[in-house]
Amino acid sequence: MENSRSWLTAATFVALVALVAACSNPAPAPEPAPAAPTEPPEAELVERGKYLVEIMGCHDCHSPKLMGPQGPYPDPDRLLSGHPAGTQLPPLPKDNAGWALLSMDLTAAVGPWGTSFAANLTSDDSGIGTWTEEQFKRAITKGLYKGLEGSRPLLPPMPWQNLQNLKEEDIHAIFSYLKSTKPVANVVPPPVPPSAPPAGA
């Protein structure tokens, strides 16, 4: 009987120790869920977009040029405003078969597709001022005029095929920058089919 009582006392003691240990060591709290990625501040986003526009060479075709000692350079007053409306192109050489030609300021191109003119990308309504970001995305990744489904394809030399895999955040940054640009009113002429002479020819 004495042994049974000792055994019962020992078992009770062990149970009490386990209970105290369980109460003093609560289960660890679940780890907090990772914070959702936050969008960079607007100024940082615009700066990123400006950087991308510059390294991707958008000014090469979309900015009218001034001529300097080292050749053409973007006109700071008309950055990204596209081919200047009313500009007359020089007559085309008669024997231009097999060639693609560029205007002196690189905003117009002539080739087997006809004559194409670089678009106005500024925040003006004659540029992309009324566009949605989705339109912009479709334009540069699917090569659709004004980013509208069912519209004509963008013509050379616009390298939209190279932009198909742009990351969403880069498209967003570029669009944010373009929407922040100085508006330049300039209605770019429509493309000229290959059978018709370009303006001024």
Image: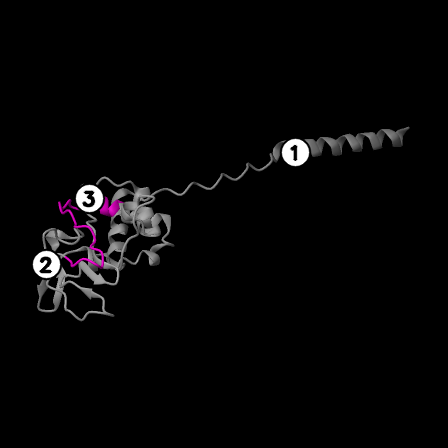
- Depth order, front residue of 147/178: 147
- Depth order, front residue of 184/26: 184
Disc 2 residue type (three-letter): Gly
Q: Quadrant for the N terminus, please.
A: top right
- Left or right for 5, reference 133: right
The image position of residue 122, as x and y in percent, is: 19, 47
Disc 1 residue type (three-letter): Ala
Label 2: element kind? loop
Disc 2 vs disc 3: Cβ atoms closer than 8 Å?
no
Residue at the spot 26% in from the left edge and 41% down from the top edge = 131
Residue range highlighted in magenta: 176-198
Disc 3 residue type (three-letter): Ser
Name the residue carrying label 2.
200
Residue 198 visible in image = yes
- Depth order, front residue of 169/34: 169
Name the residue carrying label 1.
22
Give the color scheme: rainbow, by chain, secondary structure or one colour: one colour
Q: Dot 3 surroundings within 10 Å: few (below 14), some, or many (20 or more)?
A: many
Snapshot quadrant of residue 160? bottom left
Indicate which disc, 1 or 3, sits on the residue closer to the N terminus: 1
Disc nearest the viewer among 1 and 3: 3
Disc 1 vs disc 3: Cβ atoms closer than 8 Å?
no
Q: Is residue 190 magenta?
A: yes
Residue 135 numbered tag = none
Q: Is residue 99 above or below residue 117?
A: below
Q: Dot 1 surroundings within 10 Å: few (below 14), some, or many (20 or more)?
A: few
